[in-house]
């Protein structure tokens, strides 16, 4: 690596601060945060306190940051989905390389506009499809490219979102409504569309999809249910009770030792008192049956690829834990794995099973199976010394967005088969 890269961050929320900015603490010799933009004073204060950003380079908005001459090598855009493009396009014109939180945009025409602008300006745009950077998926990808199981015939992938995660992000949280963010197949599962496309190694030509918002609706509320969890008469037997999720849950609860996401979404100063205040007054204390959510809580997608491979994907809110699984079926064998376990099984037909145990993922900085930190390492190498290929370039990312948005179009039209080339052309 020839030099440390400088970074400005637009959006110091959970991803901007806890995933991307945190890399400076892990590898200070590779990256320095020199400016941030966020409307919340406490998040700007965090940038000064934790990352040494000068107060005069902490801006209240992305527009204010972009009104300055170029401040850094890279602009990280980690705002809400619908705000990405209005910062990304002028940033490219200013001469920034970009690290862009997924999805690029819920509007396909904006995704295409970014792709064209990136080529016009000759800048690196890395989209945060972090699963490609994990050891787990890279190992499976390498095995497939080596022909370990022969020609790929079919693939099945599952995203188990976990009941508490779905309630937090997609019922009570920022991604609960398509008009405010994106449909869940894009907001959450464009990761999966991208990884399926990468593993298959061929363009997707056709999709169909089914799914709905079935459970998190008013008619399913139990007897005695209140508008807020803290004063609800049905909370004892309700797994979606906010007090259980944010105070008691083994993965997300304060009393289990959690001090970061999802609790930092409720309050910047994570204490039990502040959490109770947030549950009593904020959106995360609302009953899941009485929110204004409209995104699917379960969905399946069928995909056909140019090389003849067929794939299926299932996304569900109704799982105990949050993890992904994948099974690839080839002419000479199969590969199966669980991202949470970080183990890959290779079964060549007629031969003993091979179990590949991958390196353990550090608890300190292990977002998305270690993909967050590995992506940041890749960003630093590419920008500082031109090392590496465009693993999650804007060109690759737009493909997954077309797949996800076409799947949503199919779902809205009773599972109609959507041809991707026609779908993309019609949205230009």
Image (spheres, helix red, strand yellow):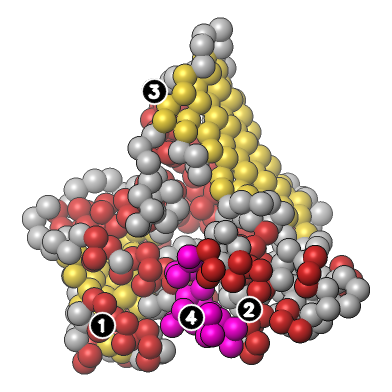
Q: Nearer the viewer, mark 1 or mark 3?
A: 1
Query: What x and y, as percent, mark residue 40?
Result: 41, 89
Figure check: 31 above or below 150: below
Q: Which residue, given by chain and number where applicable, does mark 1 sit on? A: 49
Disc on res. 146? 3
> Where 156 sits versus 21, above or below?
above
Q: Is residue 153 above or below residue 385?
A: above
User: Would you say the residues marked 2 and 3 are in contact, meaning their CB atoms lie under 8 Å apart?
Assistant: no
Residue at left 55%, top 30%? 336
In terms of depth relative to the viewer, which is nearer, 395 or 155?
A: 155
Crowding near pointer 1: few (<14 within 10 Å), some, many (20+)? few
Residue 89: quarter of image: bottom left
The residue singled out by tag 2 in the image is 284
| Mark 2 vs mark 4, CA separation in Å | 15 Å
**Residue range of the region highlighted in magenta in the rendering:** 257-278
Badge 2 or badge 1: first in the primary sequence:
1
Q: Closer to us: mark 2 or mark 3?
A: 2
Determine the CA span between mark 2 and mark 3. 47 Å
Q: Nearer the viewer, residue 299 or 306?
A: 299
Residue at 52 percent across and 9 percent down: it is 351
> Relative to the observer, which residue lies in front, 357 or 176?
357
- Helix, strand or loop at mark 4: loop
Q: Is residue 262 magenta?
A: yes
Q: Secondary structure at mark 2?
A: helix
What residue would you read off at disc 4? 271
CB contact under 8 Å: marks 2 and 4: no
């Amino acid at each position: 690596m020839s030099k440390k890269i400088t970074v400005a961050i637009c959006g110091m929320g959970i991803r901007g601060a806890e995933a991307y900015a945190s890399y400076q603490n892990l590898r200070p010799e590779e990256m320095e945060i020199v400016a941030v933009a966020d409307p919340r004073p406490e998040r700007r204060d965090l940038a000064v306190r934790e990352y040494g950003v000068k107060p005069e380079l902490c801006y209240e908005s992305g527009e204010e940051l972009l009104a300055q001459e170029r401040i850094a090598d890279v602009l990280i855009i980690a705002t809400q989905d619908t705000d990405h493009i209005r910062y990304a396009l002028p940033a490219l014109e200013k001469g920034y390389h970009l690290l862009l939180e997924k999805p690029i945009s819920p509007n396909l025409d904006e995704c295409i506009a970014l792709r064209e602008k990136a080529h016009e300006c000759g800048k690196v745009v890395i989209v945060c499809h972090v699963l490609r950077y994990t050891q787990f998926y890279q190992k499976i990808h390498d095995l497939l490219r080596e022909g370990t199981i022969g020609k790929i015939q079919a693939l099945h992938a599952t995203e188990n979102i976990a009941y508490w995660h779905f309630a937090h992000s997609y019922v009570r949280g920022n991604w609960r409504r398509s008009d405010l963010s994106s449909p869940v197949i894009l907001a959450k599962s464009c990761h999966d569309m991208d990884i399926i496309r990468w593993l298959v190694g061929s363009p997707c030509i056709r999709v169909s999809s089914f799914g709905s918002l079935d459970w998190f609706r008013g008619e399913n509320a139990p007897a005695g249910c209140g508008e807020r969890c803290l004063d609800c008469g049905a909370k004892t037997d309700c797994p979606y009770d906010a007090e259980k999720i944010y105070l008691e849950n083994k993965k997300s609860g304060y009393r289990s030792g959690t001090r970061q996401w999802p609790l930092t979404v409720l309050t910047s100063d994570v204490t039990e008192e502040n959490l109770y205040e947030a549950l009593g007054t904020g959106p995360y204390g609302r009953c899941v049956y009485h929110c204004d959510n409209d995104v699917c809580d379960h969905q399946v997608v069928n995909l056909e690829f140019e090389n003849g491979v067929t794939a299926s994907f299932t996304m569900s809110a109704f799982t105990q834990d949050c993890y992904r699984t994948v099974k690839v079926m080839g002419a000479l064998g199969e590969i199966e794995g669980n991202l949470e376990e970080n183990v890959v099984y290779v079964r060549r037909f007629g031969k003993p099973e091979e179990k590949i145990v991958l390196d353990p993922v550090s608890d300190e900085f292990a977002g998305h199976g270690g993909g967050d930190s590995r992506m940041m390492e890749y960003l630093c190498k590419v920008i500082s010394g031109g090392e590496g290929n465009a693993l999650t370039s804007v060109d690759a990312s737009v493909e997954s967005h077309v797949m996800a948005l076409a799947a949503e179009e199919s779902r809205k039209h009773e599972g109609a088969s959507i041809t991707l080339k026609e779908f993309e052309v019609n949205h230009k």
